[in-house]
Image (tube, rainbow, N blue to C red):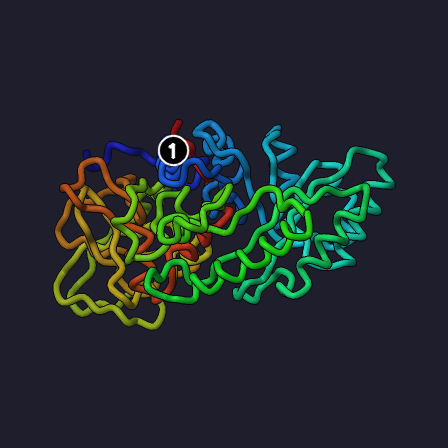
Amino acid sequence: MPGSHPLVETQRPVWAEIDLEAIRANVRTLHELVAPAAVCAVVKADGYGHGAAECARAAIDAGAAWLAVALVEEGVELRDAGIEAPILVLSEPVAVLADTVVARRLTPVVYSEPGIDALADAVAAAGGDPLGVHLKVDTGMHRVGCDPAVALDLARHVVAHDELRLTGVCTHLAVADEPDNPYTDQQIELFEAVLGLLRARDITPGLVHACNTAGAITAPEARYDMVRVGIGVYGIPPAPALSDAVHLLPALSLKARVSHVQTIAPGARVSYGLRFETEKETRLATVPIGYADGVPRELSHHGGEVLIHGRRFPIAGTVTMDQLMVDVGDEPVEIGDEVVLLGMQVEADAGAQITAQEWADRCDTIPYTVVCGVGPRVPRRYLP
């Protein structure tokens, strides 16, 4: 009901709700899709803005066998949170962090002799058990990884170190979200050649993995022993063309409460640049969230909307750093009413939902940037 949600004076009325059951459901769905391959849940970038530790626990509860992060520091954060599952670091650690990798029992990917040597030296200095590493092969993404021509030599370099174990070989698919692009087949063929060469030289590759979420859907022949699923864990299809390929549940909702309401005259112009002008007398609701919190400034100029009382209303004028305005017409909106920027509203009509893909389409980007962009000053509330 309007006005039934009074503001809490000591807390900013902005929050993101993370549905952990949606995370679990998505992991179960993806696991069923790729079985018998294992699932590695990618929780880098603070779980794509959803909260790394909380989402990691939910993913493990639902059957994820591995977690993956981009940075050693992200792996340390998970260990500090008490998470004991295997954690894959997706880029070769810089030498200065080799000791930390060993101490925190992380599994790094490697693709250079200096990187391999630094890890071996760290294990020798610690005096512990051998460290498992995964050799990353660049089959065409050209981001990180070794040239396929040197993969055998690097694998031998790992095996030559008593302090290390080659426990995996992996690659990354560049265009798996484009089902008809033949480049994926070329990458898989090149990867298969590397695996065949290793096996011919009596080097066991260990855990073989290549697929991201898109690859898990579009390239079943490349699921191998494990898939690394990121965006799908959070309920977002990796591309619009794949939105119906597997049933996923969006886990993040972005919400706020109206902080100010005013009636403005016809011809009034709103916000920076005065780009929005009222055509008639209207009520204007201020919402205390802005581009510093992850609401794209570009949304202002491309038809961005919010949900209030289960209805869509347009953002009025330029989104500012901390606040935005909404043209609510003659709707009886009051201070304290809930505003949904991403997600669904309980009283909304069927189908009244604002998705990360909608924002992405309006702002000419991808939904990854939308959810990762929800800023750290937005508190996360976790629904069990």
The answer to whether residue 47 shows anywhere in this view is no
The vertical placement of 347 against 274, above or below, is above
- The 10 Å Cα crowd at callout 1, few under 14, some 14 to 19, many 20 or more, is some
Quadrant containing the C terminus in the rendered view = top left
Residue 174: percent from left, percent from top: 47, 62
- Kind of element beneath mark 1: helix
Q: Nearer the viewer, residue 226 or 4?
A: 226
Quadrant containing the N terminus in the rendered view = top left
* Residue at 48 percent of width and 34 percent of height: 64
Residue 254: percent from left, percent from top: 36, 45
> Where does label 1 land, which residue?
28
Q: Which amino acid, by three-letter code, is at mark 1?
A: Arg
Residue 127: percent from left, percent from top: 85, 35
Side of 186 relative to 81 (left or right): left
Residue 80: percent from left, percent from top: 65, 33
The vertical placement of 314 against 341, above or below, is below
Q: Quadrant of residue 267?
A: bottom left
